[in-house]
Amino acid sequence: MKELILYSGFAGITVLLGGILAYYFNHHIKKSPIKYEITHTMMSFGAGIILSALALVLIPKGMEELSLLPLAFSFLLGAILFMIIDQYLAKKGGKVATLLAMIMDFIPESIALGAVFATDKKVATLLAVFIGLQNLPEAFNSFRDLIQSGYTSKKTFVIFFFLSLFGIGGALIGHFLLSDYPNLTAHLMVFASGGILYLLIQDIVPESKLEKNYLTALGAIIGFLVGIIGEKVI
């Protein structure tokens, strides 16, 4: 049990670490074209990481357990629900798409981590590292989005602190409640995938583009490569 808390705690603490990095980056790095490029590259890198989680972990695991109709239903339900949430937030003037995407893949992956831990600790360890790596750029971008939406740094750090605990909670749920229900876990993963893909296409990818700069797109390629490496090692 201590090991599970340790692994899931590492996966979650990078949420807080990403916020800290974003805070110091915003306050201690002067405004310049290079800073702007770094910001967009991090956003692009995060998009690549999120896409790799969807394409290499969430969807494949869901397809292993679900038949076509349940798979399609959960996927579309996730996309439609987050479209509705995104429309509501847009009317409020908020910029929390990256935060939603982070939560959408963080929670089901943490649950999967807990479910896998009982049978293969090596895979669980590598999965925790993979989750932690993708949370870092996502939290970096989410912190900046929340600040731009009017949140104070203190309030944002409080949000990130509690989000960092989601990994432990999700892993414990997966370990104790869902280990014997692979179909339910698969539905959760596919549902999350639909929402993630919607947010990527609608909000995150368009905002990561920088006019007259083509190197920032490589951030997404590198981010996806990180996912490939993580999946290959696992």
Image (cartoon, rainbow, N blue to C red):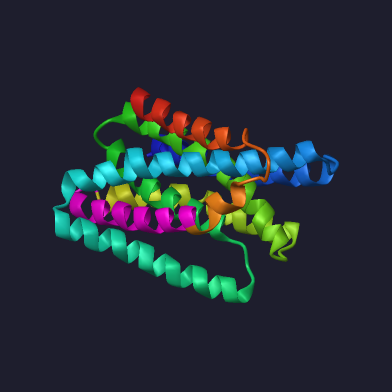
In the rendered image, residue 226, in percent from the top left (x then y), is placed at 47, 29
Q: Main structural element of the magenta stretch: helix, strand or loop? A: helix
In the rendered image, residue 44, in percent from the top left (x then y), is placed at 57, 42
Q: Is residue 123 visible?
A: yes
From the viewer's perspective, is 7 left or right of 163?
left
From the viewer's perspective, is 84 left or right of 159?
left
In the rendered image, residue 132, in percent from the top left (x then y), is placed at 50, 37
From the viewer's perspective, is 142 left or right of 134?
right
Nearest the viewer among 219 and 18 is 219
> Does residue 34 lie above or below 67 as drawn?
above
The residue positioned farthest toward the front in the image shown: 212
Magenta stretch bounds: 179-201
Q: Is residue 190 magenta?
A: yes
Residue 127 falls in image quadrant: top left
Q: What residue sits 45% from the left and 41% below the top?
A: 8
Q: Is residue 13 visible?
A: no
> Does residue 52 lie above or below 204 as drawn?
above
In the rendered image, residue 5, in percent from the top left (x then y), is placed at 44, 41
Q: What residue sits 42% from the left and 54% below the top?
A: 196
> Does residue 168 lie above or below 96 as drawn?
above
Q: What residue sits 23% from the left and 59% below the top?
A: 72
- The quarter of the rendered structure image containing the C terminus is top left
Q: What residue sits 84% from the left and 44% below the top?
A: 31
Residue 53 falls in image quadrant: top left
